[in-house]
Amino acid sequence: MATNPWVPVSPCGAHCVPDTPRVSRLRVWTRLAAFGTFAVLVLALGVATMAMPRRARHRYWRRSARIALASMGVRLTIEDRRPETARRLRGALIVANHISFLDIVAVASVAPARFIAKREVLQMAGFGYVAKLFGVLSHVRGDLGRLRPLVDRVAGILDRGRSVAVFPEGTTWCGGAAGRFRPAFFQAAVDAGAPIVPMRLSYSESGRPTTLAGFIGDDTIGTTFSRIVSARELTVEVTVFDLVLPVPDRRHLADVCEEQIVGVPAPHQVALKPAPSASAEPVLDNAVDRGQDPWTLQNDRADSTPSNV
């Protein structure tokens, strides 16, 4: 079967996951019971929270995310490098590396936001209701025709002062390796003039880096969840970096955030400054007029490889 060159692929799989000691069955069942009880309560109260003022609702979801991690036996540590004024900012594009479905809970524990998830995940049993409750946006990977409207929608959400979280690698990696950051959704920050908040997610067990939380290869939600609740001392660390201000070149924004989060040097280091008030849309329109695909256009340099979507 031919593969879609625009769909990101990770080489990570079962060979990346360590064989480490696990907690007792009693501890596992205790965690399962705690998480199940918590999940039922949160979902039952979910609709009611929509009537809360936004700040109160955000506090509720932030605390709920932290309780969810604790119920699974996962410890959370947060290193927030932003100045105090930046921490109160709303309407930011949050970008993070992608390792596990726990990433969503970890990010939400710091900054509640609307997330973007691939359509296949939202079609899993039970996830449709949860996605609707949390305002998750569906993304069909590899479908360039639907990408621009979704980016426009994200820009509109950012413009209204709401935050959106994306994982620009486009798929999960084990944590011991990482993928390139794709620039498409950075265009939403450019169009809305919204700041970007880079977050690094890392997992450790008993103080040592681990890949056991990875949702990779042939993993199902169940197999990854089983490893998580069986782990002895699993910790997720969220490192929040200072704001990156939007500039017209989304590829540059992706490179800068990638360097901060996963340590890959950006090809061009320049001082970042806010984008001009004029939208980058005319650049994309001009590309269409010339018969070019605007999603392979780079403002300062062309790069038409699929990894740049």
Image: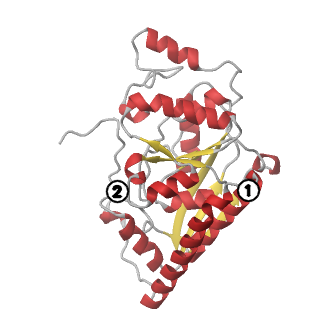
Q: Looking at the picture, does residue 221 appear above or below residue 70? A: above
Residue 114 pos. (x, y %): 59, 48
Q: Looking at the picture, does residue 149 appear above or below residue 122? A: above
- Numbered disc 1: secondary structure: loop
Residue sitting at 47 percent across and 37 percent down? 182
Residue 283 appears anywhere in the view? yes
Q: Which residue lies most toward the left here?
A: 1
Q: Relative to residue 17, is residue 297 drawn left or right? A: right
Quarter of the image with the C terminus is top left
Which of the 4 quarters of the picture holds residue 108?
bottom right
Q: Which mark is residue 12?
A: 2
User: Is disc 1 surrounded by few (<14), some (14 to 19) or many (20+) residues within 10 Å?
Assistant: few
Of circles 1 and 2, the one toward us is 1
Q: Which mark is residue 274?
A: none
From the image, tell me which residue sits under label 1. 52
Which of the 4 quarters of the picture holds residue 188?
top right
Label 1, label 2: how far apart the Cα atoms are: 41 Å
- Numbered disc 2: secondary structure: loop
Q: Nearer the viewer, residue 129 or 223?
A: 129
Residue sitting at 43 percent across and 65 percent down? 211
Which three-letter amino acid code belongs to the residue tagged 2? Cys
Residue 266 pos. (x, y %): 54, 37
Q: Looking at the picture, does residue 148 appear above or below residue 163? A: above
